Image (spheres, helix red, strand yellow):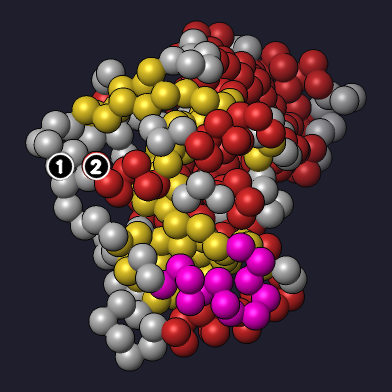
Amino acid sequence: MKYFHLVWSALMRRKTRTIFTVVSIVAAFLLFGMLDSVRTAFAAAGHSVNGASQLITMSKLGLGSQLPLSLQSRIATVPGVSAVTRVDWFQGIYQDPKNFFPNEAVGSNYFAVQDAVVLPADQLRAFQTTRDGAVVGATLAKRFGWKIGDQIPLEATIWPKKDGSNTWIFKLVGIFHAKHASEKAIEGAMFFRWKYFDEARQFARGTVGWYQEKIASPDQASRISQAIDAISANSDHETKTETANAFGASFISQLANIGLIVSGIMAAVFFTLILLTGNTMAQAVRERIPELAVLKTIGFSNRSVLGLVLAESVLMVVIGGVVGTLLAMVVIGGLKAKLGATFPMANVGGSIWGSAIVLMIAIGVIVGVLPALRGMRLKIVDALAGR
């Protein structure tokens, strides 16, 4: 802090250039904060509180292949399986493709297996007894202003009805909440009766997308998974069973490798930022060669000059980085309020701030080290002579 006024004065020597450079840094860290928020949310989506006590059994060929309905009763007899239900991914659209949200056909006992939600008992009974009944998460209900008793039409993208229509109409009989704050994303989903879906769909009746099991002990997950898969071994519908956490991570990876995409984008952004900021620092030091020579003349050591230039570089990046990350917090807060749990975004918390600060300091040092070394090595006589 002793020489802060010197660092600040040097930084403000060319205000316009500095401001434009800082704006570029702000934009880079705003993008970083938002992208890392999405990456963190997708990574956490495959690690729920209840995921270790639930198993998912799907076709060994992938989610695109259906399983026979008769498999459910055989899975239920496996020691360690407390309950088993059936699930099909529906992928219906409400009013407009932009209104996408997860929607699935599930067995009437689904909420005995999926214990990550809280659904009032009377609403659960209504779901189990209403042929075309559906339940939605509180976030989704708030997003569209739905209330119990509403009729919700979905346009099929995969499953047309047997009468040739693509419009499915469901009666809203319940609104659930997530049991744990870390599983808030499930409140953006809709579930409806699998039996109604199976009776009305045009093709693949009597088959299931995947089975979901609740097990008594997470420690037995591996043994139970092997026992379930052994049921269909060497058949035309061999299965792959894994924990719900592993299934979630696998499902997300089928959409895209979020971590790789984010890393690739940010590598390009920060590489460009390093070139831009490095050029700014090189110009700034080149213009101040005589001033640095004067500092050496009045007693500043080589290390002091090195430190001043590096401090200037780091300060510029830190100012822009902090402002950009703060803006990311504001933008993400606004997006989460608007989108709810439909699109996963994590809060800009300690881990993202930690990564951002490390990046700020690292980039500051990288772009400042060469100009700083030049300032440290300059000879007073040559510098003052303009050589």
Give me the C-alpha separation between circle 1 and circle 2: 6 Å
Label 2, secondary structure: give it.
helix
* Image coords of residue 185 (percent x, y): 57, 36
* Image coords of residue 322 (percent x, y): 66, 24
Say whether residue 384 is visible. Answer: no
Q: Which of 45 and 319 is in front in this view?
A: 45
Residue type at mark 2?
Ala
Query: Mark 1 sits on what residue?
Result: 162
Residue type at mark 1?
Lys
Q: Is residue 170 above or below residue 213?
A: above
* Image coords of residue 332 (percent x, y): 56, 23
Assess whether mark 2 and mark 1 are in contact (beta carbons under 8 angstroms).
yes
Q: In which quarter of the image is residue 244?
A: bottom right
User: Magenta residues?
Assistant: 71-83
Name the residue: 46% across, 38% down.
191
Give the number of the disc on residue 200.
2
Q: How many labels does the image show?
A: 2
